Structure formats: C-alpha cells, structure tokens
Amino acid sequence: MGTPQFPDLGKHCSVEDCKQIDFLPFTCDRCRQVFCLEHRSYIKHSCPKADSNGVIVVICPLCAKGVRLNPDEDPNISWEVHVNTDCDPSNYDKVTKKRKCPVRGCRELLTFSNTIKCRDCTLDHCLKHRFGPDHNCPGPKKPDVSFPFMGLLNRSKKEESKPNRATAVSSSKWTTNFLSAASTVRASAEASMAKLSSEISQVWQTATNSASPSSSNGSGGIGPEECPQCGTRFSSVTNLIDHVQKVHEKGGNQSRVLQLPMEVCPKCSKGFRDPVALVEHVERDHRGTSKA
C-alpha cells in the first residue's frame, strides 16, 4: 500500500469483494469504516447503522438553544457537555421574547431587515413608524444632571455662594502679591524714564554747546550754515558748498571738508552737523513733517 516515498498514502476499501486501494478514500459517518468511490454510500456497502441517520435535537429550557444528541452516545452525557460548555441562561430572553415596535397598537416584529433606530430618541421602530411624527418622538434627550461636568459646575456654584475663610485668606495673599508686583513695575518704569530724560538733556546740552561757537565766530554773514574753514555763514547748504569749492578746494583742504558729516533738511535744504538739531528744526519750523 502506498509508494516507497509515501508508504501511508491511500487505503483499501472495507468491502470484502473489493479491497481496492484508493488514494482518496471515504469514511462513513455511521460505521466509521473506509470505502472507495464506488462503495461510499450506505446502500452500496450495506451500512448496519444506516437507520440511525436521523438527527435528534432537544431544546434546552435554560438557554433555549438546540442540543444535538449523538446516537452513539448516552443522552445524559450529551446534555452534561452542553450545560458545562455552551449553555448561557442570558440568551433565553433574546430567543423567546421577540421585540415589537414600541408604538401603541403596532404589532410588527422587529427583525434585522425592518428595524430603524431613531436618531433623537434612540429607540428602535418598524419601517412604518420610522419618522418622528409617526411615533410621537419627544426629541433629543436633555443632558443628564448627573454628568460629571454638570456636577462639577454645580459644586463650584455652591462654593462661590458660601463664603469660606480659606478663600478670604488666599484672596488677601493674592492681593498683596499683586500690589508688590505692581510697585516693582512702577519703580522700574520710573527709573527708566529718569535715565531717558538724563540722556535727552545730555544730547540737548551737547547740541547747544556745538552751536554756540559758530554764532560767536561769525564773520558778519547772515544764515544758519557756517563754513568749517573760515567761519563764514550762509543761508543754505548749496551756497556753502559753492563757497568751499571756489575758495578752499584749491588750498588742499578738500579732504578735511568732506570728512565732516552734514545732515540736510528735505524741506528747506538747510544743513545741520548734529542730527538732534535737524529733528528740532523739523518739529519747530515744519510742524514735524519731513516730506517735501
């Protein structure tokens, strides 16, 4: 039986007159013997247990499930196996009590294919009463008062209504800390303002000192612009530049003149050596606007 490579492959038919080897044998579910393709049926191999082919099922009174009794086994054993392994008493109500549509007067049984759950009241209804007006839907449910957030909110309201000594102490501490922080911020702001005012006064003093020699060393000219070489005053920067190019450029002092920075007013073309003086001039004579 079989091959050298697979010695257990295939089995002989159990019929005495056949004994044919079959590599795909059939096992009878009644007598548990092996047969070939020709003798696989009960009639062909004259099965002695063919009459016990009927199936006996008992309904369990605890879980309402069907228990199949094996003919070759004691019914008590089959029953004990079911009770110990597969019996679930909670399934009894699901099987015996069929759900119906909750609408008054409706006897429609709710099955998998005709059950609709309402989105507002979350109840199951039949297809006929699936809309809200048909089953008198009360609408969406209101939030439960026992919800944790609602309970916390009510608790906080009660705590606010009842004055507590600890709350008063904590509020007084908070007020003290706030006042101390405010005083610190105010002191730092006052120090910053004092420092800024001192710097502004120093700049103003420097601008005043730089402008005083030019007025004392004037050579009789009229104007705010002064030549750094000879002290001659001019009414505009253009005249001053022309004077420097004609008089002092030939004397080799061009580099000295060009090294001096000059700020020009965009409104009246007046020049200032100090930027602070230019800002003051714009604010005083042009009302704070430097656009032409």
Image (cartoon, helix red, strand yellow):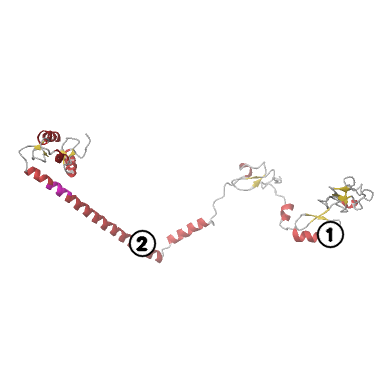
Residue farthest to the left, as pictured:
220
Q: Residue 144's quadrant in the figure?
A: bottom right
Report the amino acid beneath label 1.
Answer: Pro
Pointer 2 or 1: first along the chain: 1
Task: Decide whether the magenta segment is chiefly helix, strand or loop.
Answer: helix
x then y, percent, for residue 244: 12, 36
Q: Nearer the viewer, mark 2 or mark 1?
A: 1
x then y, percent, for residue 214: 9, 43
For label 2, the crowd category at 10 Å Cα-Cα, with few meaning under 14, some 14 to 19 and many 20 or more, is few
Q: Quadrant of the C terminus?
A: top left
Tell me: 50 left or right of 194. Answer: right
Separation of residues labelled 2 and 1 (CA atoms)? 82 Å
Q: Nearer the viewer, residue 289 or 179?
A: 289
Q: Nearer the viewer, residue 100 or 68?
A: 68
Q: Is residue 176 above or below residue 124?
A: below
> Where does the magenta region start and end?
203-209
- Reading the image, the residue beneath label 2 is 174
x then y, percent, for residue 78: 81, 59
Could you say which disc has been placed on residue 75 in the image?
1
Secondary structure found at label 1 = helix
Q: Nearer the viewer, residue 46 or 60?
A: 46
Q: Is residue 113 above or below residue 92?
A: above
Q: Residue at x 26, y 57 (%)?
A: 188
Secondary structure found at label 2 = helix
Q: Is residue 275 above or below residue 188?
A: above
Residue farthest to the right, as pictured:
17
Tell me: 205 left or right of 61. Answer: left
